[in-house]
Amino acid sequence: MAEKMTEVYGAYDVQIMQVMRGRGAFVLRTDKGIFQLKPMDVNPSRLAAEYEFKESLVELGFDSIDYCVKNKDEELYTCDRYGNPYVLRRFFLGRECNPLNQQDIVMGVRNLAKLHQVGREAFKRSERDVHLRVTGDFKKRNQTVKRVNNYILRQKSKREFETKFLKTYDYFYEQGLKCQSEYEAVKALGNEAHQGYCHGMYNHHSLVITGDDSMVGTISFDKFYLGNQMDDLYHYARKMTEKNDYRFEVFATILEEYGRVNPLNQEDYKYIYINYCYPEKYYKLANQYMNGTKNWLSPKLLEKMDKLTEDEGKKQMILDKMKKKYL
């Protein structure tokens, strides 16, 4: 046990039997279970909101999550002798969800459906005046892409990434404009039925399969928010499908398994379809380029551009099949 952390460990009402290091944090095996002690990377008000949100999930029976643990002084974080704040959360020993394993994918989407159920109930019970986050600001993203294109056009000499960006600009920018127009017409659809807490970054990295593969632990709620839960479903379905080389069967299975718990209608499918249509990866590349160092371009940018254009045909096949099956 690191000497400098002794005071932090002692601030909690647990008996520590083993300390392990992992991913920039300490994993503690204690008399009350497994916990993770990690440097606090959010402000106190956001941490308090996280605690309240997770407490409501636990009260509603969704307790396999990395909820925050208060110290003996009933505080949500503890500082070491140098003033560095740490947060203790419940943790899980197991393996990360395998995006290539059908059983894991299904366990993950069923877990998401249950999370959304209690997330809606928690939202209904909340007595605070909460702000619903509206996602899909395609207009702003399109403006960013156009600004990057204009910037590159002004450069006298153009490197390979910049040349490829210009060649693909018209194609992806037109996609973005079309999605912007269609999204304006459907952004409110389904919001009321699916209003509630969203995980914010739900994917295989946020799922721990524990024990005999019978339980899922949900972690990494860093970006949780109140909004349309279809955003979580879209991101999970897209990520898992891409990890499986754009197999439509994976995409369809995720939507169908989710719908067994939380029924989906055509408006929901339309919402997911439009979000998937948007060239999000192209926008992200534009953003990374604009915010990065211009005198040296990371080779990763070019690799991602090549991968994006290589996968575009596969993505369009997914969209075509989705349109035929659900719309």
Image: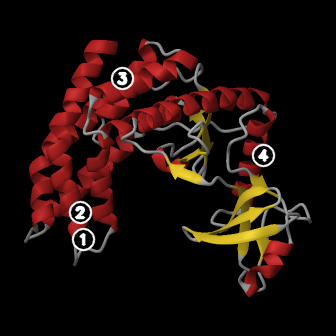
- Of circles 4 and 3, the one toward us is 3
Quick one: label 2, few (<14), some, or many (20+) residues within 10 Å? Answer: some
Q: Are marks 2 and 1 in contact (CB under 8 Å)?
A: yes
The residue tagged 2 is 301
Q: Separation of disc 2 and disc 1 at Cα?
A: 6 Å
Residue type at numbered disc 1: Ser
Please state if 8 lies on the left or on the right of 324 as rendered. right
Tell me where residue 33 appears, x and y as whole percent. Answer: 76, 55
Which quadrant is the N terminus positioned in?
Answer: bottom right
Q: Are marks 4 and 3 in contact (CB under 8 Å)?
A: no
Which residue in the protein does label 3 denote?
Answer: 252
Where disc 2 sits, the SS reads helix
Percent coordinates x, y for residue 314 in the rendering: 19, 35
Nearest to N terminus: mark 3 or mark 1:
3
Find numbered disc 1 in the image and state the secondary structure of the residue it sits on. Answer: loop
Applied colour scheme: secondary structure
Q: Residue at x 32, y 69 (%)?
A: 292
